[in-house]
Image: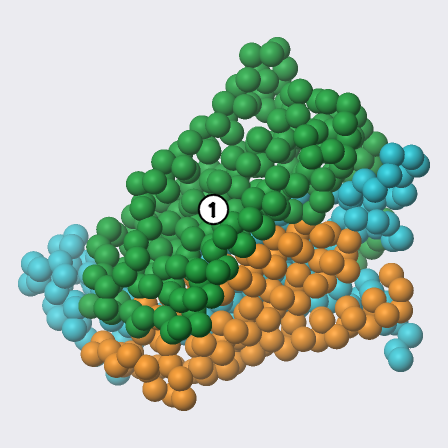
Chain colours: A cyan, B orange, C green
Amino acid sequence: MIPALTPELILYATAIGLTTIGLAGVVLSVHLFRMVLSLVIAEAGVNLMLVLAGYRWDAVAPILTSLGEQPAMVDPVPQAMVLTAIVIGVGVQALAVSILIRIRQRYATLDRWEVAERMDADIAATAGTPRDVSQEAPLGERPLPPIPAKRVDPSGSES
Amino acid sequence: MTTIELWIALTLALMMLSAAVMVLLVKNHIAAVAAASVVSLGLALLFVLMRAPDVAMTEAAVGVGLSSLILALALRRLGLWEVDGKTVKPNPLSLNREKRDG
Amino acid sequence: MGNLTGLLFAGGLGFMLLAIAGGLDFGAPPMLIGSAIQAQAPAETGATNIVTSVVLGYRAIDTLGELSILFAAAASAGLVLGRRHTSAGTQTEGGFILRTGGGILFPLMMTIGFYIIFHGHLTPGGGFQGGVILAAAFFLPLLARPGAKLHHSTLSLIEGFAGASFILVGLLALAEGKAFLQPLLIQDTLGQLFSAGTLPLLYLAVGLKVGAELASLLSRLAQTEASQ
């Protein structure tokens, strides 16, 4: 057994690892649903970190068991914060997922770059301005959307 | 923390980290949702070890149960519910570019 | 290029968190508020579960804010998904085990949900956990019989009533000359079911609100049109 293997190391490594993996997934993933899943993982890591901040050696759970002398208890304030954060997290997930459903209905794809491309074209068509294509990445092999200025139908990008 | 708790925490930590990596790497979307709920389950058990039973109950009810349910329902609606590589309900608007990401 | 930037970002973030965590003193929280709350909570709120006394007593306005965030998220999810519902038939009927088990499990889940809500001030549990179980209980028949419909108007009535009663209890404390949402009616029966004054009422409101919100959210998600 490695001598440095303390609970401190294990738990903090888990919390930091989950947060980092989750945020890396948010940045790197191409599929939008994968992005939501990565968000779930990052949230789990942050919750673990918050509960860890209130942990105390040799303490009991913050529930009174007798009326006499109280043993040392774990800090209850971070736990109350995490309690609400978990429920908020599921609300955010549901919102993200319903936005994904609408994106899929409108653009028929969940690829991140393709959705960005079509959304960009859609916005340009609605605003009646020429699309800004002067980004450093060329459009490349992606199929060019129709010229936006000519399009009047706002829902024209449905395939 | 006793030694047995240390070993339990180590096992759970390894399980959660590998499941988190699997969420990003695995191809099938149902498997990815399952791996995400494995992360939540390990987190609930870790909360018990951290003397936070309230939070553990919430995580077990919300993170493992409800969140997986929401994600699975969304998989159905998004047409990504595929078993053995093919979508169960054939959809005319199937993804034109199913990318494996990581 | 983009991948490299993302990996760099993730690595830098991990390093930053590591640096922060290295400075923390594990196992000995520097916060003093925790021990102060622990010493005073039984006398001030009458709850044996200290986390409940923090959630509904010392940080009750926080909980009110959390409820409004959840309401905003559920309302905007409903707005994004729209009101269109599928007729029955797009979803496959549940099997025999799911239908029978749903019928048997429904009263049990209701019972355990309310049990967890009502004992929130004594044991681990409370409005959030019990509310989620209530939502699952209402969603189960929907899963077994796709044609069944939840009454959205009833659900929103329950939700609005619960939210209003949460604020009403807070205003009651204000009328008594105390602070907003300060616990009232502290009896001298620590550890009994009827103790802790208004905290169980607040948790009941939280549980009903969370349950109704999540049940309507789930049924919306289950019944929206599959992408054309």
User: In front: C66, or C102?
Assistant: C102
Q: Position of residue B27 (x, y in %)?
A: 46, 83
For residue A16, side relative to residue A87 (left or right): right
Write the residue at 58% across / 21% down: C180
Q: Position of residue C114 (x, y in %)?
A: 56, 44
Q: Where A135 falls versus C20 (above or below)?
A: below
Q: Using the rendered image of the protein, determine whether residue A99 is visible from the camera's viewpoint.
A: no
Q: Position of residue C116 (x, y in %)?
A: 62, 46
Type of amino acid at the residue the image marks with label 1: Gly
Instruction: Identify residue for label 1.
Output: C211
User: In front: A102, or C228?
Assistant: C228
Q: Using the rendered image of the protein, determine whether residue C206 is visible from the camera's viewpoint.
A: yes
Location of residue B96 (image quadrant): bottom left
Write the residue at 63% across / 15% down: C178
Q: Residue furthest bottom?
A: B84
Q: Where B81 falls versus A101 (above or below)?
A: below
- Crowding near pointer 1: few (<14 within 10 Å), some, many (20+)? many
Q: Position of residue C3 (x, y in %)?
A: 49, 75
Write the residue at 82% across / 73% down: B7
Q: Where A124 falls versus C170 (above or below)?
A: below
User: In front: C39, or A131?
Assistant: C39
User: In front: C216, or A113?
Assistant: C216
| Callout 1 secondary element | helix
